[in-house]
Image (spheres, rainbow, N blue to C red):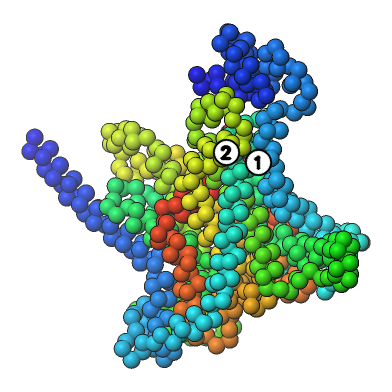
Amino acid sequence: MREILSRLRAAGGGLRAAISRDESNGDQLATDGGTTVTTAGDDTLRKSLPVEWELVESAPFWLPPVLLAGFFVYGAIAWNFLLSLTDYNGLGGATYANFDFSMYARMLNDGAFWHAAQNTVVLLVVFTVLCLALGLLVAILIDQNIRFENSFRTIYLLPMSLSFVVTATMWAWVYNARSGVFNQLLRLFNLEGLLVGLLRPAGVNAEVIQWLSWNTTALAAVIFALIWQFSGYAMVVFLAGLRAIPQAHYEAARVDGATTVRMYMRVIIPQLRASAVSASVVLMVFALKAFDFIYALRGSQPGANMDILATMMYRVAFDSLQWAYGSAIAIVLFALALLVIGPYLYSEYRRGEL
Amino acid sequence: MSTGTRDYVEELRDMDNSRIGLYAVLLFGIVFYLFPVETAVMTMFKTQGEFARTLPFAPPSADGFTLSALATAWNTLRPGLLNSLVMAIPATIMSALLGSLTAYGLTTISWRGQVGVVVFIIAGIFIPYQAVLVPLAQFWYQILPGLLNGFVNTVFGFITGGDWAYPSRNGYVQLFQLSITHGAYGIPICTLLFRSYYQAISDEMIEAARLDGASAFSIYRNIILPLSLPMFAVTLIYQFTQVYNDLLFALVLVNEPAAQVATQRLAALTGGVVQSFNTTMAGAIVAAFPTLLVYIVFGEQFAKGVAGEN
């Protein structure tokens, strides 16, 4: 029944009543996936339409929102690219002239750009890998038929519901050199002196750890806080993946006498590949967007140790009013995002997951 | 036989030990995920001297307890909270409604090549917003006012006398612009959430309605929309949290102090030179309060929204 209905759906819309009569007459409804339907009478309407009827019928629903989002997303990116080719800066409107790649050439010789690019890649990779690892571990622990599972899950996911600005405010206090939690705890266990010796950058005199300004710790501190905020997300994705694995796989491994660790390493974790891929794509995108966190923590000039392309772009464009240069940096950031999501969306498309 | 029994008992005891270990680790997880929030709550009730002197996660002593930090933060953030709600609620509804319509047109009604449109729109979820910031500022501050001024002064020139100007510096106008911007950028994720939901809806009811001659709109109105209500809850909650929490768009689109949203005001509070951590922590909790409330009440829907984003 359902098959017939879906075949019917592939046929023209205006002639539904006629088609449904045809159906009862026999199998006149041959279809090759919905393009050519050899029902007499349908041909005339079909030929008069250059496109499928369903496309026409559905357009009022999806076309206006797609155009709106398309304008804001792709229109703006194209526009941004155009601006990156100009020399637009300062107050006043843009002048669309002198198109060249001088802003991109400027980047190559800009030490600040390379710092920011390096930090962005380090943040992207380290944050994503550690977040996945922690999320997987927590998901496996939660998946052990524990009591109060929902409460644990809700609490672990809670940081993700908070704004970057809120979490940055909280972490600024946690990392505070004089009275923050970390340094006070280290002091309590007499570990502060030891760590100061280990972490203190050359030429610095401080006796307390300046987590957010030392070049040895600044980026790590940001990454740690972001892992705190987003590992709950990785947990949720992995948990959904774990729940999709048939119970029989666990039982088979148990019957084979595998230990718990072996069972997870050999049987369960390999099946979580899809979850890991989709979680890492989203996490990388979060990492590229970490602007709000760093801005709330250190303002638009976080210093070379913490600067990422997102903060640099904002500073160059909106503080220094170098619009064209800012646009060019934004295009690099966009290209990075494309490197991450392009292959992902393509493989999803190939697997028919979209 | 007796060895077998002993093995079993031992296994049970081992299991108990491992269960205890498991719960210990899970409890440590609670400490890990909540300590920054807990220290913020404790610190916001402490006086300046008290928070410098005590451990951040310890509750304030009777002498060191104060509500003045909370009062200061509340007074600073209150207009921002209101602005945030006024901006975020319409933006959320707009994204959810348009996302639902888009998903309907691209899922329930199926036609060849629609996957291309789906990829086109879903890719919009993942773009870094830096890539659209300069054009956004151009659009809202240069192009749109220019076009509107020209249009209004030409068509209604006899009323305006040719000197009407789009009120770019009006706080409400800026909030409106921010709201529309968020609404538009929210369409892709809302479409994805609704699409995965609509894919699971059985075709048969819809086909039956089609055979009865129901129009696409009436199918949406009478079948899809009522079935979508749980998904609307998920989408509205998730999207509200995202919009409310954003700072970047607000920084770029809102510069009138009276129109600043909560995250902007909190960032200003934190960025101050004097580090009164009791006030900034109170500010963080006040700014987080709406989303925390939503999360505590609708945690399940939020988790679904999060899980849908992959």
User: Residue A27: which quarter of the image?
Assistant: top right
Q: Position of residue B126 (x, y in %)?
A: 63, 52
Q: Position of residue A353 (x, y in %)?
A: 56, 36
Does residue B40 appear to the left or right of A22 in the view shown?
left
Name of the residue lying farthest toward the left:
B2
Q: Chain of mark 1?
A: A
Left or right: where B218 falls relative to A99: left
- Dot 2: few (<14), some (14–19), or many (≥20) neighbours within 10 Å? many
**Disc 1 residue crowd, few under 14, some 14–19, many 20+, Cα 10 Å:** many
Q: Is B61 above or below relative to B125? A: below
Q: Residue at x 70, y 28 (%)?
A: A53
Q: Nearer the viewer, mark 2 or mark 1?
A: 2
Name the residue beneath numbered marker 1. Answer: A61
Q: Is residue A309 visible?
A: no
Give the secondary structure at mark 1.
helix
The three-letter amino acid code for the residue at tag 2 is Tyr
Q: Please indicate, yes or no, whether residue A82 appears anywhere in the rendered image.
A: yes
Left or right, residue A3 beside residue A325: left
Rendered-image quadrant of the C terminus of chain A: top right
Q: Residue at x 60, y 53 (%)?
A: B95
Circles 2 and 1: CB distance less than 8 Å?
A: yes
Q: Position of residue B13 (x, y in %)?
A: 17, 50
Front residue of B233/A213: it is B233
Above or below residue A53? Residue A193 is: below
Tell which of B189 and A342 is nearer to you: B189
Vertical relation: B39 (above or below) A284: below
Residue at image mark 2: B220
